[in-house]
Amino acid sequence: MGHENVIYDVKNNIGFLTINRPKSLNALNGKTIDEIRDVLAEIKKDDQVRVIIVTGSGDKAFVAGADVTEFEKVGIDKGFDFSRNGQQMGRDIEWLGKPSIAAVNGLALGGGLELALSCTFRILSENAQLGLPEVGLGVIPGYGGTQKLARVIGKSRALWAMLTGDFINARDALDMGLANMVVTHEELMETALKVAGKILKKAPLAVKMAIMAVNHGSEIDLESALIYESAFANLLLISKDKEEGIKALMEKRKPNFTGK
């Protein structure tokens, strides 16, 4: 299926999803969100894709927010569904069962930061700027930002970013745990590929179960989360990948995982 606002490609078991609206600083409009969700649905069904890298076209922006020209036309009759569609885009990423790497190559504001927050990892170019400036427009973050940012960096820091509108630079993002790595702009995609390569060496089912355990467990009480962990761990005991992993260790060789 062809897309107007995103580019999707697969190489060596890695899916590359690029938001491609550079003239609009890759701002998210409804069509772009729908296209992202279409690609994510394709990725979820494709067993050959084991990791995805999400980035933006050009050198200025990952995603600079929602498309204001579209957003200004949204009234109370459609606003709830407008917000929920953006939130569901993030949930689609979180529940892929496959790790996602946001390669943040510039501005990640509003919906852009919310998109990055939905990814498993965030690798930032040193010139990246992150923020949730919506309050300055008379609204609040509506694609999950009020909830996800607080869960990552804490309530006080999240409210500071929202209420002051101050941007978070790459180094500060790293210090507060919002970023996993900060690299030069030139090293960004190479670094994302290296991280993806490390993940590709791991057992696909175990990767999926680890993501599910963390995602489920972070939203419920500890004892229930531990039960989830035991259930997922138990399921992996009958996998061929578990047998292969132990056999490879005993034979002092690299495992050949098949995802079964």
Image (tube, rainbow, N blue to C red):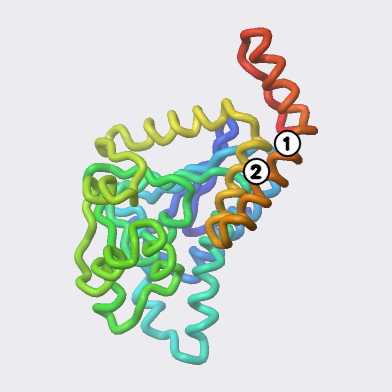
Q: Residue at x 24, y 74 (%)?
A: 163
Depth order, front residue of 101/251: 251
- Left or right? Give the position of 22 relative to 260: left
Side of 213 relative to 104 (left or right): right
Q: Which residue is mark 1?
A: 236
The answer to whether residue 130 shows anywhere in this view is: yes
Q: Amino acid at mark 1?
A: Leu
Considering only vertical position in the picture, is 65 above or below 188? below
Residue where numbered disc 2 is placed? 209
Q: Nearer the viewer, residue 226 or 93?
A: 226
Vertical placement of residue 29 versus 204, above or below: below
- Residue 154: percent from left, percent from top: 34, 61
Q: In x, y percent, where is residue 52?
A: 53, 43
x and y, in percent, of residue 106 in the image = 28, 51
**Residue at (28% x, 40% y) in the render:** 182
Residue count near mark 2 (Cα–Cα under 10 Å), binned few <14, some 14–19, many ≥20: many
Of labels 2 and 1, earlier in sequence is 2
Task: Tell me the quarter of the picture where residue 235 sits.
Answer: top right
Q: Residue at x 31, y 32 (%)?
A: 187
The answer to whether mark 2 and mark 1 are in CB contact below 8 A is yes
Dividing the picture into quarters, in which one does residue 222 lie?
A: bottom right
**Residue type at numbered disc 2:** Met
From the viewer's side, name the closer residue of 88 and 250: 250
Q: Secondary structure at mark 1?
A: helix
User: Label 2 to label 1, Cα distance in Å?
Assistant: 8 Å
Q: Which label was assigned to residue 164?
A: none
**Is any atom of residue 23 visible in this view?**
no
Q: Helix or strand or loop: what does disc 2 sit on?
A: helix
Of residues 260 and 242, the one nearer the viewer is: 242
- Crowd class of label 1 (few under 14; some 14 to 19; many from 20; radius 10 Å): some
Q: Could you tell me which residue is drawn at 39 percent across and 57 percent down?
A: 152
Q: Residue furthest right?
A: 238
